[in-house]
Image (cartoon, grey):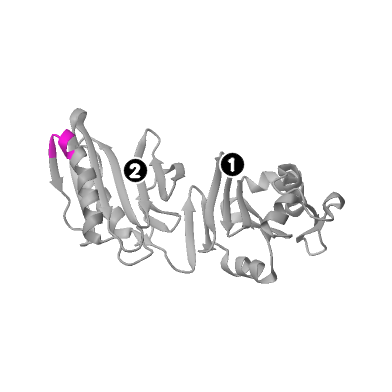
């Protein structure tokens, strides 16, 4: 199920589903093996999502018992409880009417095979006058839900959309107005990916490759490479003299090579910039062949 006039695709960390057009990411964090997202509209948080890949050997019945125990606490505080029908058999979802005309939908979807996560959803709504009805809203989400466990992972949030090889694991975020940063790791390799808004204003200051060079030097995330622009307007790095024998972090990582690139996306008035610390030619080839701006 694709995006519609009223809904858009949200994708993060292997999960994807449709959300209302005025919802978007408010918070992302990881607590041990549990990953957590909070999505909000202009007024308040609307959706909480928690997921974890169960340990090998954990039975489906045991997972369901834990989920039911968690839901029982919510049911005890509810004025009324109603199961939400029309979902696939992997879903369990309930509508809870709470005090103050608040509505809470609590749902979970069981993993289908090893490597898939157990995912909890908590959707917050207010009053039966909510349009569309909370149950309808959740059915749209559940019907569009996908787990991307293959070679390529989509990322869709705010005005950002791209795909990365699944070997890259999210390690940090910096989501500021006009600048979104996602940091990834692949083993000891590091990847930083920025998306800048208002690309045309950037170009008025300086052409994109030289602006990117200035930004990378100012960011000082990786102190070893000195960035330059070649005749084909591509970025390339030489080693700063003081790091001729290596720098402590790259020695610890055994990653002594650096690459960077940029992509102007005029349809979004956006500039994407990436920075990669790696070991071998195959590492860079994997990134360049698997990274796609969508």
Q: Is mark 2 on a helix, strand or loop?
A: strand
Q: Is mark 1 on a helix, strand or loop?
A: loop
- Rendered residue at 82%/61% (across/down): 230
Q: Of the residues tagged 2 and 1, which is closer to the observer?
A: 2
* Displayed quadrant of residue 76: top left
* Displayed quadrant of residue 59: bottom left
Pick the front one: 237 or 59: 59
- Asked whether residue 6 is in view, the answer is no
Q: Residues within 10 Å of mark 2 (few under 14, many from 20)?
A: many
Q: Residues within 10 Å of mark 1 (few under 14, many from 20)?
A: few
- Please determine whether, in this image, residue 60 is positioned above or below residue 183: below
- Rendered residue at 61%/50% (across/down): 194
- Asked whether residue 37 is in view, the answer is yes
Asked if residue 37 lies left or right of residue 248, the reply is left
- The disc placed on residue 47 is 2
Of callouts 2 and 1, the N-terminal one? 2
Pick the front one: 256 or 166: 256
Q: Position of residue 36 (x, y in %)?
A: 40, 46
Mark 1, residue position? 178
Q: Residue furthest right?
A: 241
Q: What stretch is highlighted in magenta?
A: 75-80
- Rendered residue at 46%/44% (across/down): 28
Q: Does the magenta stretch include residue 43?
A: no
């Amino acid at each position: 199920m694709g995006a519609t006039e009223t809904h858009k695709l949200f994708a993060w960390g292997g999960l994807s589903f449709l959300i209302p057009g005025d919802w978007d990411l408010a918070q992302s964090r990881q607590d041990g093996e549990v990953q957590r997202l909070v999505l909000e509209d202009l007024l308040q948080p609307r959706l909480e999502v928690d997921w974890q890949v169960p340990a090998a050997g954990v039975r489906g019945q045991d997972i369901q018992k834990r989920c039911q125990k968690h839901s029982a606490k919510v049911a005890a505080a509810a004025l009324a409880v109603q199961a939400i029908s029309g979902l696939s058999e992997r879903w369990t979802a309930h509508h809870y009417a709470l005090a103050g005309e608040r509505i809470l939908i609590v749902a979970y979807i069981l993993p289908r095979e090893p490597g898939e996560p157990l995912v909890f959803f908590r959707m917050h709504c207010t009053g039966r006058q909510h349009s569309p009805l909370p149950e309808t809203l959740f059915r749209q989400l559940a019907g569009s839900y996908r787990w991307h466990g293959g070679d390529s992972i989509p990322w869709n949030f705010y005005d950002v959309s791209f795909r990365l090889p699944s070997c890259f694991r999210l390690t940090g975020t910096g989501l500021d107005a006009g600048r979104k940063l996602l940091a990834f790791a692949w083993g000891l390799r590091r990847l930083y990916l920025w998306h800048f808004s208002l690309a045309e204003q950037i170009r008025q200051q300086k052409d994109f490759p030289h602006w990117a060079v200035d930004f990378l030097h100012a960011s000082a995330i990786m102190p070893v490479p000195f960035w330059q622009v070649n005749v084909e307007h591509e970025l390339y790095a030489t080693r700063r003299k003081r790091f001729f024998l290596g720098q402590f972090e790259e020695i610890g990582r055994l990653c002594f090579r650096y690459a960077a690139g940029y992509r102007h996306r005029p349809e979004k008035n956006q500039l994407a910039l990436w920075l990669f610390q790696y070991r071998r030619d195959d590492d860079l080839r994997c990134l360049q062949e698997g990274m796609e701006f969508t």
